[in-house]
Amino acid sequence: MSLATHFSAFVILLTVGIHRLLCCICNYLKNPSLYRSKTWYFSEPRWKNLDLYSLLIILPIASFSHAFLFLAFSGNNVMYKFSFLQQSLVIFFFWVFLILIVVKESFDLYAILDSLVYSFAGVCFAVEFLMNGKGLVGVSGGMYGHLGELAFVCGGCCLCLAVKPSLFFVEFLFSCVLVLKGTWVLQVGLSLYTDMFSLDGCENLLVGLSKGKNDVKCDLEENKLRGTALMNLLFIVHAVVVMIMSFGLFALLNRDKRMRCGDTSGPLLTEVGSEGVLMRPLPELELE
């Protein structure tokens, strides 16, 4: 783990979360009664889906890198060593999830239902929840614990959408949590892996890990308790800011139609759109 890893996760989660939030709000405002969630919101022309294609390249590289670090690690901290393998497995699961989406959308495979794709996404988030921050305790364990809680919420949202994809508030919550995961993973990286933003009276996590400990090293117990309280407060602040931003975006798009994103493509959206706008011509006998 490093600040670069957390910053990369921040960029990916924030980009995916905001893109998903914008698209789901736009599709809902077009026709709320016909709204159905999509596993991924594709755009036309194809080059606009650069975020998805980038992830298809980045994720396997990141998974291989973590696996390589697991094999090359020579320290005495066994839990820290196996955390690389766990993260590699989590990233690999999400890469398989993206491949499943691309295959389904590219070949119009209706046999691969969205409910199955969402169910698999729920499994991916469940794996992340079980492996997030494994072996860390104290302040660092609590900070990674919040990431695990957010992964658990994402998994629950995916399972709800697998059963009933027309639940807009679940899709809205899912997108907001993705954005929150992005901002919080950056906060974790800054607080645990840098000296500039580290907790008062505590060293960064890498110092503790180098000494075989699974938590940040604090001079006094009071510093550790104060750090834990501060991180919990910051998490609440992050959640409030993200929710205010999300509801503000919904209100802005609802008020100004010119700011809404363009149509997204895909078999499911085509089907829903046709239900809303297609008018079948009456038979000639009835016209007479």
Image: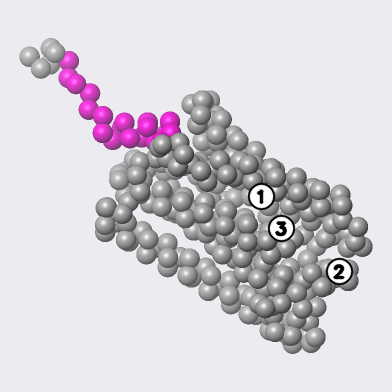
Give the class, few, some or many, for how many residues have Cα within 10 Å of label 3's Cα (few <14, many ≥20): many
**Residue 71 to residue 110: above or below:** below
Q: Give how far across and how far down residue 13 sits, in percent.
A: 56, 55
Tell me whether circle 2 and circle 1 mark residues in contact (CB < 8 Å): no
Residue sitting at x 27%, y 52%: 258
Q: Tell me the amino acid under the disc marked 1.
A: Ala
Q: Is residue 31 magenta?
A: no
Residue sitting at x 67%, y 78%: 196
Q: Nearer the viewer, residue 19 or 267?
A: 19
Tell me whether circle 1 and circle 3 mark residues in contact (CB < 8 Å): no
Mark-to-mark CA distance, 3 and 2: 20 Å
Q: Counting residues from the N terminus, which is met first, the one under dot 2 or under dot 1?
A: 1
Give the class, few, some or many, for how many residues have Cα within 10 Å of label 1's Cα (few <14, many ≥20): many
Mark 3 or 2, which is nearer the eye? 2
Q: Secondary structure at mark 3?
A: loop
Q: Give how far across and how far down residue 179 sits, in percent.
A: 52, 59
The answer to which image quadrant residue 37 occupies is top left
Q: Counting residues from the N terminus, which is met first, the one under dot 3 or under dot 2?
A: 3
